[in-house]
C-alpha cells in the first residue's frame, strides 16, 4: 500500500538520521571513512525512531543489500559512514 511505502520512506530517513546521531554521539574520533560499529539492538533502534522492530529489520536489510550497513547480532556496522549519509 502507498501508506505503507510512505511510512517506510519516513522511517528510513528517521533510521539513517538516528544512525548518524549515534555515530557522532558514540564519540569515536576516527578517520572520516573508517567503519563504525554500534552496539545496538534492532529493538532499541526501533524504539528510538518510534517504529517497530520488524520495520527496522526490513530497512536495515535494504541498507545491507546496498552494502551500506552490516548486521550482526546486537550490533550494526557502517562500513563507510559517508556513503550511507550521502544517500539519505
Image (spheres, rainbow, N blue to C red):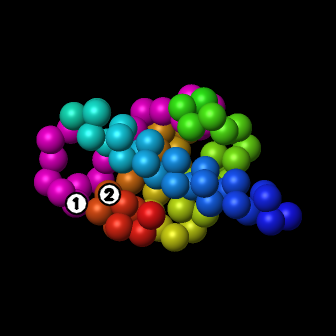
Most foreground residue, 22 or 5: 5
Mark 2 — residue? 81
- The span shown in magenta is 28-46
Callout 2 secondary element: helix
Most foreground residue, 56 or 65: 56
For this view, does 62 lie left or right of residue 34?
right
How many dots with numbers? 2
Residue 36, image x and y in percent?
31, 47
Residue 10, image x and y in percent?
60, 54
Mark 1 — residue? 33
For this view, does 60 lie left or right of residue 26?
right
> Can residue 80 be spotted in the picture?
no
Q: Earlier in the sequence, mark 2 or mark 1?
A: 1
Report if residue 44 lies within the magenta region: yes
Callout 1 secondary element: loop
> Can residue 10 be spotted in the picture?
yes
Most foreground residue, 18 or 6: 6
Quadrant (top left/top right/bottom left/bottom right) for the C terminus: bottom left
Amino acid at each position: 500500500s502507498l501508506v505503507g511505502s510512505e511510512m517506510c520512506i519516513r522511517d528510513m530517513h528517521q533510521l539513517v538520521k538516528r544512525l548518524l546521531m549515534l555515530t557522532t554521539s558514540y564519540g569515536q574520533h576516527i578517520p572520516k571513512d573508517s567503519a563504525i560499529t554500534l552496539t545496538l539492538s534492532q529493538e532499541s533502534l526501533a524504539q528510538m525512531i518510534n517504529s517497530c522492530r520488524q520495520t527496522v529489520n526490513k530497512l536495515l536489510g535494504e541498507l545491507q543489500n546496498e552494502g551500506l550497513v552490516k548486521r550482526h547480532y546486537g550490533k550494526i556496522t557502517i562500513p563507510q559512514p559517508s556513503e550511507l549519509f550521502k544517500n539519505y
